[in-house]
Image: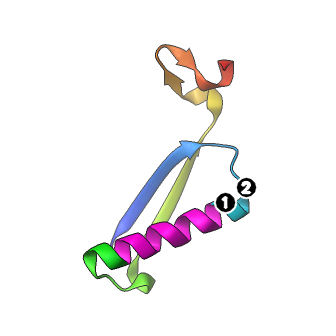
Amino acid sequence: MPIITVQMLEGRTDNQKRALVKKVTEAVSETIDAPEEKITVVIEEMAKNHYAIAGKLASDK
């Protein structure tokens, strides 16, 4: 039972998340020959003020 975690900044729509989990599930199923009903995708969203690149918060951009 594969469990895939996707970490990303907040701000995507529910439709974007639906499309993401569909594609990720399909890719994992095809790659490792796992049945789609056994694949779990977890989306972890981070607030932009909880993530930094090169010493700058994403919320400061």
Q: Describe the element under mark 1 as helix, strand or loop.
A: helix
Q: Secondary structure at mark 2?
A: loop
Q: How many marks?
A: 2
- For badge 2, the amino acid type reads Thr
Q: Residue at x 42, y 83 (%)?
A: 36
Is residue 26 highlighted in magenta? yes
Whether tag 1 and tag 2 are in contact, CB under 8 A, the answer is yes
Which residue is rendered at x = 63% and y = 31% of the image?
48
Give the Cα distance between marks 1 and 2: 5 Å
Left or right: residue 28 versus residue 22 is left
Image point (65%, 43%), residue name: 10
The residue wearing badge 1 is: 16
Whether residue 1 is visible: no
The circle drawn on residue 45 is: none
Q: Position of residue 61 (x, y in %)?
A: 66, 20
Quadrant for the N terminus, please.
bottom left
Task: Look at 28% across and 82% down and name the residue there.
Answer: 33
Magenta stretch containing residue 54, yes or no? no
Residue 18: where, in percent of width, then height?
Answer: 63, 67
Is residue 21 placed above or below 11 in the rendered structure?
below
In this picture, residue 52 sits left or right of residue 19: left
Judge the density around disc 1: few (<14), some (14-19), many (≥20) Cα neighbours within 10 Å. Answer: few
Above or below, comparing residue 33 to residue 5 in the picture? below
**In the figure, is residue 61 to the left or right of 37?**
right
User: Please, what is the three-letter code of the amino acid marked with disc 1?
Assistant: Gln
Residue 23: image location, x then y, percent: 50, 69
Q: Nearer the viewer, residue 42 or 54?
A: 54
Q: Main secondary structure of the magenta part?
A: helix
Specify start and end residues of the magenta stretch as a single range: 17-29
Q: Which mark is residue 13?
A: 2
Residue lying furthest top in this view?
55
